[in-house]
């Protein structure tokens, strides 16, 4: 009588290793879709608003029809950047005021912002407004601030603001060069601080 031979067993351990390696490969090589986002610092709770005057607020609204209004006036969205530039760089404070801006190159109108430190952009939008329009408005606001920062960076350090940031990220950590670049960046940011509020400001 012949003995029945058992079929050879398959070593599943190596197959599990291969499956695990394939999983890691797909996780590493697969690119996930990224959503557009905005970097913002949230205001401190219970922020003081008593010293905010209407002339220091530029009110921008995106309505349900995706139209952009500044101070309740309908504008061409392409003009928004220049409107923000004029407002932030106005420098309307009197020369004897502690908020006088000596580096501002605006019209120094008493009806517009006192200084970049006092200038606030108040942005509101309808719930039915397009997210693309909202992003475009945000980009124009940041472009305006970056233009002003670049102007001052070139005047003070003969380098654009974007190149200053690039050099900072390229510099070796904890090096004296990185410390110096950080100080320069902070100086430029202090001259034109970005103040964008997305909560309705009531004076």
Image (spheres, rainbow, N blue to C red):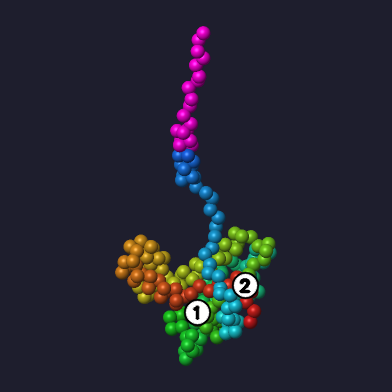
Q: Which residue is mark 2?
A: 199
Identify whether 66 is placed above or below 154. above
Based on the picture, tell me whether residue 197 belongs to the magenta stretch. no
Give the image location of residue 21, x and y in percent: 45, 39
The residue carrying pointer 2 sits among few (fewer than 14), some (14 to 19) or many (20 or more) residues within 10 Å by Cα, namely few
Identify whether 32 is placed above or below 155. above
Give the image location of residue 99, x and y in percent: 49, 85
Give the label on residue 144, or none.
Answer: none
User: In terms of depth relative to the viewer, which is nearer, 143 or 109?
Assistant: 143
Report the magenta residues as a range: 1-19
* Quarter of the image where the C terminus is located: bottom right
Q: Please give left or right for residue 136 compared with residue 95 in the image.
A: right
Based on the picture, tell me whether residue 17 belongs to the magenta stretch. yes
Query: Does dot 1 land on a helix, a strand or a loop?
Result: loop
Give the image location of residue 198, x and y in percent: 60, 70
Q: Please give left or right for residue 172 compared with residue 47 in the image.
A: left
User: In terms of depth relative to the viewer, which is nearer, 76 or 138?
Assistant: 138
Query: Does dot 2 land on a helix, a strand or a loop?
Result: loop
User: In terms of depth relative to the viewer, which is nearer, 47 or 11?
Assistant: 11
């Amino acid at each position: 009588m012949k003995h029945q031979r058992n079929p050879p067993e398959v070593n599943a351990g190596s197959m599990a290793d291969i499956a695990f390696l394939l999983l890691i490969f797909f996780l590493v090589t697969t690119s996930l879709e990224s959503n557009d986002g905005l970097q913002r610092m949230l205001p401190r709770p219970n922020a003081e608003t008593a010293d905010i005057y209407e002339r220091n607020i530029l009110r921008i609204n995106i309505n349900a029809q995706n139209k952009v209004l500044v101070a309740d006036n309908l504008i061409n969205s392409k003009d928004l950047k220049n409107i923000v530039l004029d407002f932030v760089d106005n420098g309307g404070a009197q020369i004897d005021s502690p908020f006088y801006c000596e580096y501002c190159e605006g019209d120094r109108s008493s009806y517009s912002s006192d200084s970049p430190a006092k200038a606030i952009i108040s942005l509101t939008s309808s719930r039915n407004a397009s997210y693309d329009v909202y992003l475009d408005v945000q980009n124009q606001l940041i472009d305006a601030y970056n233009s002003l920062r670049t102007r001052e960076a070139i005047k003070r350090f003969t380098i654009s603001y974007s190149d200053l940031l690039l050099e900072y990220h390229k510099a070796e950590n904890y090096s004296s060069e990185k410390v110096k670049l950080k100080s320069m960046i902070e100086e430029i940011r202090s001259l034109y601080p970005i103040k964008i509020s997305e909560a309705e400001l009531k004076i």
